[in-house]
Amino acid sequence: MKETEILKQWIDESDNIVFFGGAGVSTESGIPDFRSVDGLYNQKYDYPPETILSHTFYRKKPEEFFRFYRDKMLCLDAKPNAAHMKLAEWEKMGKLKAIVTQNIDGLHQKAGSKKVLELHGSVLRNYCEHCGKFFDAEYILNSEGVPKCDECGGPVKPDVVLYEEGLDNNVISEAVRCISNADVLIIGGTSLVVYPAAGLIDYYNGKKLVLVNKTPTARDSQADLVVQGSIGRIFANL
C-alpha cells in the first residue's frame, strides 16, 4: 500500500486525530518561512530575523522591530490552502479533536477550524501593554513607528511569543492532553527542531505517528508512517 493510502485508511477509521503543524503548512499560502534566511533580509535589515524577533530587541529597538514585523510577519491577505481546509473539514466530521500549531497567522481559524492551540500566539491579537485594550492586526499594519494605544497612549504589543519569552502554560498543558490522548497524531510542515514545541510529540502514546513534510525530519525514524511531499497536495488527495 502506498503511504497516502495507509494515511487515508487511518483517518477513515479514527475519530480522535490531532494535527501538529509548523511553518510548512503556511508557506503554501505564500507566507514566508523566515528560518530559510534569504538575501532579502541581509540587504534590508542589519540583524538576522531571530535577533529582531527577540524580547530583548523588541525592548531595545522597538521601531526596527515593528519595521520588520509589518514587512514580514503581517501577511493579512494570505488565504488558507488545501491543508487548512481539509483539517477544518475533519473537525466538522468529528474526526479531528485539535490542531496544535507553531504558526501565528490565524489561517486555521480562517479555514473554519475551532479548536486551534496556538503555541506561539497570533498576529491577529494585539494588546496595549498599559491598559490591556485589544487591537486587531490592521491597527498595527496601519500605524507608524511603535503602535500606541488610542485610549491611554501605551505601547501596543503583538500577542506573539518572541524569542526569550515563555510559552503559555495553559496552551501547553491542553496540547499535551490532546496529544497524549490522540489515536492518530499527524505532524505536518515542521522539521521538529524548535523546542519546546517539538518536544510535545514525546507525549504521544499511540501507534499511528504520521510525519508529512517536504524534506526528512529529525524524527522520521520514530514515525509509524512518513509521507514526503507538499502537505497541501497530499491533504487535497485524502
Image (tube, rainbow, N blue to C red):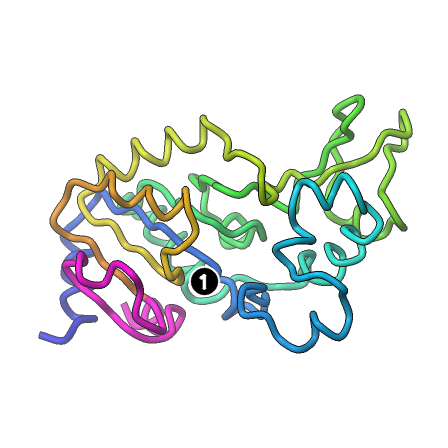
Query: Residue at coordinates 41% horizontally, 42% vertically from top-left?
Result: 196
Query: Residue at coordinates 65% horizontally, 46% vertically from top-left?
Result: 54
Along the viewing direction, whichever of 165 and 169 lies nearer the viewer: 165
Residue 128, placed above or below residue 46: above
**Residue 29 placement (x, y as % from top left):** 54, 68
Quarter of the image for residue 190 reads bottom left
Say what secondary structure mark 1 lies in: helix
**Start-end of magenta stretch:** 213-238
Q: Is residue 74 left or right of residue 111?
A: right
Q: Of all residues shown, which one is farthest toward the top?
A: 131
Q: Is residue 209 left or right of residue 131?
A: left
**Residue assigned mark 1:** 25
**Residue 123 placement (x, y as % from top left):** 65, 47
Quarter of the image for residue 87 reads bottom left
Residue 236 among magenta residues: yes
Residue 142 among magenta residues: no
Q: Is residue 110 left or right of residue 179?
A: right
Query: Residue at coordinates 41% horizontally, 52% vertically from top-left?
Result: 88
**Residue 122 placement (x, y as % from top left):** 60, 44
Q: Amino acid at mark 1?
A: Val
User: Tag count in the figure?
Assistant: 1
Along the viewing direction, whichever of 166 and 209 lies nearer the viewer: 166
Within-10-Å neighbours for mark 1: few <14, some 14–19, many 20+: many
Q: Of all residues shown, which one is farthest toward the left?
A: 1
Residue 229, placed above or below residue 93: below
**Quadrant location of the N terminus in the rendered image:** bottom left
**Residue 62 placement (x, y as % from top left):** 81, 45
Query: Residue at coordinates 39% horizontally, 56% vertically from top-left?
Result: 193
